[in-house]
Image: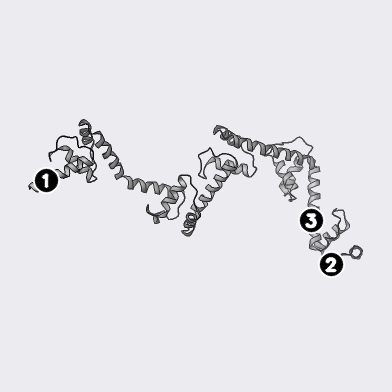
Amino acid sequence: MAQQSQHSLQHFNFLKLKYKASNFQDSSLSSLLYLILRKVELAIKISDLEFDWLQENQLLETIEIIQIQQYSLGEAKRLEAEFSHLKSKYKVAKPGEYSVDSFLYFILLKLESGNQLNNSELDLLQENNLNQTVAIVKDISNFLDLKKKYQATKSQDSYPDSRLYKILQKIDTAASLSDSEYEWLLNDELFDTIEIYEHQESAKQAEFNKLKVKYQVNKQIDTNLTSKLYQILKKIDADTKLNYEEVYWLEKQGLTETICIAERIEKEREFATLKVKYKATQYQEISTNSYLYLLLKRLETENYVSEDDFSFLKQFKLLETQKC
C-alpha cells in the first residue's frame, strides 16, 4: 500500500510539472488538483466548476495548457468536417471512399489555400477519375491567368464561382459588361482592370463605326455595342451568311443597302465555292454578274449546260469544268 501511495505521489508530482502547477502547495492525494489533472491526462473533459477552481487557485498556466489539450480532443471531428466540406466544394465523386489520411485531403487543402497543383498531383486526380474536381482545378488555373492578364491580382477570390471570374471571362471574350458588373469592379477598386476594359470598349466602338460606314448604315438607330446591329455587321464582315431573322431585322430597320451588300458577299462566296467544286478557279472574274456564275449555278441546280455554255468554257479553257 505504501509503495502504491509512493507511486501516486510521484505521479501527482509528474502531472504538476507537466501542467505547470508545481507551485501549488497541496501535494496530498486527496487534492482536487490531482483529481483534475488525472482526468485531463486521461483525455476526460473537465467541467466549468473545475475550471473555476483552477482560476480561484491562480493556476492560469495550467488552465491554458488544459484548454489547448481539450481543444485538441475535438480535432479529429473538425478534420473530418473540414474534409467533408472540401469534398463537397470541389465536387469529389464518391466522397465516402476518401478518408482524412488519403492523398486527397492534402490536394484539396492546397487548392483551398490558393496554391496551384503540380503535374503529379493533377495526375493523381485524373488517375482516380475525379473529373469534376479536375475541371474545377483547370477553372482555378484559368481564373488565376485571367487575374494576371487583366491586373486583378489584388482580389483574393480564387474559386470559379466568383463573380470576378465571370466578369473576366466576359472581358476576355470582348463582351460588354452590364452596369452592375462595371459597378462591381468599381466597388472592389479594380481600377487597372477597368482601364483595360474601357480601352477594349473604345477599340470596339471604333470598329463598329468603321463597319457602319463600310456597310452603309445611314439610319439613326441604336449604336450601342450590345446592339443587334453590331453583331450582324461583324457577321457580315466575317463573311458569314446571315440567317432569316437577321435579314428580317435589317429590313425592319430600313437598312436595304446593308442587305444588298450582305447578299452580294453571299453570292461572291457561293461563286468562289462553285469555282472550286467545278474546277474553274483559274477564271479570275469574281463578279456575280459574270456568265460563269450563272453557268455554274445552272450546273449545280439542273446538272445541265447548253451549247453556249460549252462554247464559253472552251473559250476560257475551262476543260476540267466541261468534264464535271
Quarter of the picture containing the C terminus is bottom right
- In the rendered view, does 53 fall on the left or right side of 262? left
Q: Is residue 215 visible?
A: no
- Name which residue lies at 47% across and 47% down: 111
What's under tag 3, amino acid-wise? Glu
N-terminal of the pair, mark 3 or mark 1, is 1
| Quarter of the figure with residue 72 | top left
| Quarter of the figure with residue 205 | top right
In the image, farthest residue toward the left: 1
Residue 84 spot, x, y in % from top left? 40, 49
What's under tag 2, amino acid-wise? Glu
41 in relation to 316, above or below? above
Q: Give the CA separation, mark 2 to mark 3.
A: 19 Å
Closer to the camera in the image, 34 or 274: 34
- Name which residue lies at 60% across and 43% down: 149
Choose mark 2 or mark 3, whichever is in front: 2
* Residue tagged 1: 6
Q: Give the CA separation, mark 1 to mark 2.
A: 115 Å
N-terminal of the pair, mark 2 or mark 3, is 3
Q: Give the CA separation, mark 3 to mark 1.
A: 106 Å
Q: Which mark is residue 320?
A: 2
